[in-house]
Amino acid sequence: MAQATRSHDIDMLHGPLVPKIIAFALPVAASGFLQQIFNAADVAVVGRFAGSDALAAVGANTYLVSLMINFFVGISLGANVTIANYVGEGNEDGVRRSTHTAIALSLVCGALLALGGQFLARLVHQAVGTPEELIDQAMLYFRVYYAGMPAIMLYNFASAVLRSKGDTRRPLVVLVVAGILNVALNLLFVVGFGLDVAGVALATVLSNVVSGLALVEMLRRETGAYHLSLRNLRIDAASFSRIVRVGLPAGIQSSVFSLSNIVLQAAINSLGQTAMAATTVATNFEYFTYNAILGFSQAGTTFVSQNDGAGNQARCKRVTRLTLLLGPAFTFVVGAFFYVLRVPFVAFFTTDAAVKPLAYERILRATGFQWVNAINEIFSGAMRGYKRSAVPAAISIIGICGVRILWVHTGFVMLHTYADLILAYPISWAVTAVAQGVAYALVMRARAREAAGS
C-alpha cells in the first residue's frame, strides 16, 4: 500500500523517527490546545458576563461531559489502531471497510448519547451532588451539550481515520475554523442574547457540527482506500470486531479518568461553591497539559500499530523509547509555563479573591505533575498499538480510579482541605505509571517468546 502519497500524510514505516513523531504529535497537541482555548473562552465568557453561579453550573458538567466523550474517543482509538495496522499490512480493503465502519459507528454512538442525555440529566447531577441552587442551570447545559454529541463523535472518529495515515494537520485546521466560530457564537448568545449557560452549550454544538461535517467532506474527497462513500456507510462485522477489541478497553481506560474525577467532583462539591469555581478555572490548564500528553501518546500508538502490521519490531521499540523521552519533557515544559504564569492566567477567568488561591493550589499539584501522567499514557499507547488494550485499561482502573477513591475516603476525610484533596492526582499517576511500565515490559517479553516459537 502506498505511503504518504499526499503532503499532509506521514510515512511512518521508513526514514528518521524523531522529526516524524514530532510532526505527528504537535498538531494533535495543538488541536487539543486550541480546543481547550475555545473551552476556556466558554468559561471566561460565562464567568465575566453571566456570574459565579453560571460559572459553577458549567464547571459541574466538566467531568460528566468528558466521561462519555473520553469513552468514545477511546473507541475511536480502536479505529485508529485497526486502520493503521491494515496500512502496515498493505490491506487496502481492510482500510476501506474500517473507514466506513468507523464513521457509521460514530453516528450511531452520537445518536444514543444525544437521546440518553435528555433523560439522564437530573439523575447524574443528583448523583454527583450538584447543589440544588445550581442544578437547573447545570441540567440545561448538560442537555444542550449532549444534543450535539453526534457531531462531536463524528469529528473524533473522522480525526482518528485521518490520523491513522499520519494526517494530523487537516483536523487541526478544521478545529481552528470551528473554534473561532465557537468564540464568536459565545459572545453572540451570551452577551448579545443573554442565554448564559445554554448559549455557551449551543455555541459548542454548532461549532462541532461545522468541524464534523468538514472532516467528512475531506474523507469524501480522498482517493483510494480512504475514500468515504456515504452510500456505503455500514458497520462491517469484521472491522467492528477489531475496532471494539482495541477500542473498548481504551474507552474504558479513558473514561476511568473521568469516572474517578466525578468521585473527586463530589468531594469538591462538598467544599462549596468557591472550591467548585476554582476547579472550573484550574482544570483548563490541566487539559492543556494533558493534550500535550495525548499528542505523543497517539503518535506512539499509531507508529507502533503501522510498524507492527509491517512486522518491523525494532522500529516499534524505537518509537516507544523516543515517545517516552519526548512526551514527558514536552509536558513538563507546558506545565511549568502555566505554573509560572498562574496569577495572570487565573485572573483572566475570575476576579473572585476567594477562588484564586484554590486555583493556584490545583495548578501546582495537578497541572505541574502531569508529566508523570505522560509516562503512564505513553506506555498505554504503545500496548494499544500492539493490540494489547485490555492490560493498560485494567491497570488504569486500579491505579487511577482505585487510588483516587481510596484517597477521597482516607486522606481527604482526615485532612478535608481542597489542596490535600488534589494530591489524589499526582499520587494516582505515579502508582499507575510504575504499573504500566512493568506491564509493558511483560508484554514485550511475551511477544519475544511468541516470535521465538513461531
Image (spheres, rainbow, N blue to C red):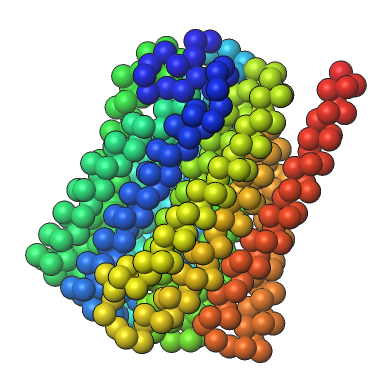
**Residue 220 placement, left or right of 291:** left
Report the residue at 60% width, 74% height from top.
423
Q: Does 311 appear above or below 259?
A: above
Q: Quadrant of residue 405?
A: bottom right
Q: Nearer the viewer, residue 434 or 267?
A: 434
Residue 157 at least partly seen: no
Q: Position of residue 160 (x, y in %)?
A: 47, 34
Tell me what residue is drawn at x 63 percent, y 50 percent. Answer: 375
Figure quadrant of the C terminus: top right
Looking at the image, the residue that sits furthest to the left is: 192
Q: Position of residue 387 (x, y in %)?
A: 68, 34
Left or right of 183 in this view: 402: right
| Residue lying at 33% horizontally and 31% vertically, measured from the top left | 170
- Where does the image place residue 371, in percent across and percent down from the top left? 56, 56
Q: Position of residue 88 (x, y in %)?
A: 60, 18
User: Quarter of the image holding residue 304?
Assistant: top right
